[in-house]
Amino acid sequence: MTLPVQRLTSWGRVMSSEQAVYHPSSRFDPLPAEARTYLPYGKGRSYGDSCLNPGGVAIKTGALDRYIRFDPASGVLACEAGVSFDEILRLVVPQGWFLPVTPGTRFITLGGAIANDVHGKNHHVAGTFGVHVRNFELLRSDGQRLLCSRELNPEMFAATVGGLGLTGLVTWAEIQLRRIHNPWINTETIRYGSVAEFFELCELSDRDYEYTVAWVDCVGTGQRLGRGLFTRGNHAPAGTSAGRHNAKAHTFPFVPPVSVVNAWTLQAFNSVYYHKQLRRSARQVQHYEPFFYPLDGMLEWNRMYGPRGFYQYQCVLPKAHGQAAITEMLDAVAHSGMGSFLAVLKMCGTISSPGMLSFPLPGVSLALDFPNQGERLQQLFTRLDDIVRAAQGRLYPAKDACMPGELFRAGYPQWQKFAGFVDPGFSSSFWRRVMEEK
Ligand SMILES: Cc1cc2nc3c(=O)[nH]c(=O)nc-3n(C[C@H](O)[C@H](O)[C@H](O)COP(=O)(O)OP(=O)(O)OC[C@H]3O[C@@H](n4cnc5c(N)ncnc54)[C@H](O)[C@@H]3O)c2cc1C
């Protein structure tokens, strides 16, 4: 079979590759007979090279879009792996259910969520997405179909959750949803002045609030270092109604010739955003879409970084070193003059991640977006990598395009065990890079 060739891009728009593309039309289709390696591709919402496999075959899962069963009494949902979180929410929210864990965009697939074992604002009470996956089918390159759960093929289950698409194709999965009464979230946003204050707010909030997250001003130095807006929220109780929700999204219309995110716009944005609410604390009832997915309101927002694209840098640091290391990182970013417009701090809890390569660990996570500024930015990443290494933290493969192989292997001590479960017919740019394969 001759497969069509397509240019695939990841979300940061720095990396792309020409690949043969295979579109299975349902979960029953076999993989095409091919000498090259395979890699599943969901919606390409990973930022770097973990969803790319130049020279190989991309298995695009868009047509694996069928629901298999949904029990509205128990909230157990089974569907094909190409179904998106957006589609799931449209089905289940009107029936009183919600995703157990969701990242900051709903435009991802179920297969992509499993392969990166995604986390969200409720990590401290719900753990990662994989905690709520009951079972799935894995199609290997030799045609074997394995049913995986905590009881059946448990090690393959643990390798595939967070396994970066390298153990085979997840064709369908069954997940446990979370009960809700309505689509509304009771939220409170609190202005805080320092990294220490962020940690105090987490301490005070993590018991009573299911969702916590902070935006941090990362151009502020001195007295302003680490200041930001801390948001906490819970699903609203029965009887709450906050009127109508305007679901209309706009699209960033074109790729500008240069990034609209630069030193001047960042300075202005960070200052205005920090002062966006006059009072120290503000409460509101919000629809779940703007609460969980503020960036989804502007489709294709990644274009605003211009033709050179952008990088995201996300790390997690163990609690013991977290505060000092975050302070050092924010100081390095602010002094580099390459501050980020999207900078997110989040406490991760102690619920163990089920995957061998799952990213979260108990501690604090920092995510920063940077316009691609070539060598200057790579020097900043080297500095940030040093801080992460010294604090015994790790970087998130879903967001990564640059981490050295040694940092990956130190951060993910189970990598050798994991390597034993990699399907010999599957590979990715990311995997070859961190394994330092030629
Ligand atoms: C705005 C934004 C906010 C984000 N916020 C968060 C966040 O808060 N938390 C978080 O954890 N992540 C976050 N992410 C990252 C995103 O959730 C992950 O990268 C997710 O895995 C993307 O899913 P996808 O369907 O686009 O998969 P892709 O990016 O296409 O692929 C991701 C990986 O999944 C594998 N894969 C895809 N489908 C399958 C399948 N059927 N079987 C086996 N492997 C498969 C691919 O091979 C690849 O390794 C965010 C991304 C964006 C753009």
Image: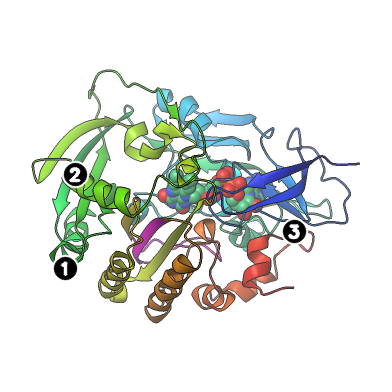
Q: Which one is in front, 379 or 318?
A: 379
**Residue ranking furthest to the right:** 1
**Residue ranking furthest to the front:** 257
Amino acid on which the number 1 mark rests in the picture: Gly
* Residue 222 badge: 1
Question: Relative to 430, is 274 above or below?
Answer: above
Tag count: 3
Name the residue that disc number 2 marks: 189
Amino acid on which the number 3 mark rests in the picture: Phe
* Dot 2 beta carbon under 8 Å from ligand 1: no
* Dot 1 beta carbon under 8 Å from ligand 1: no
**Residue ranking furthest to the left:** 279
Q: Residues within 10 Å of mark 2 (few under 14, many from 20)?
A: many
Give the percent coordinates (x, y) of residue 434. 62, 71
Left or right, 42 with respect to 11, comes to right
SS category of the residue bearing label 1: helix
**Quarter occupied by the N terminus:** top right
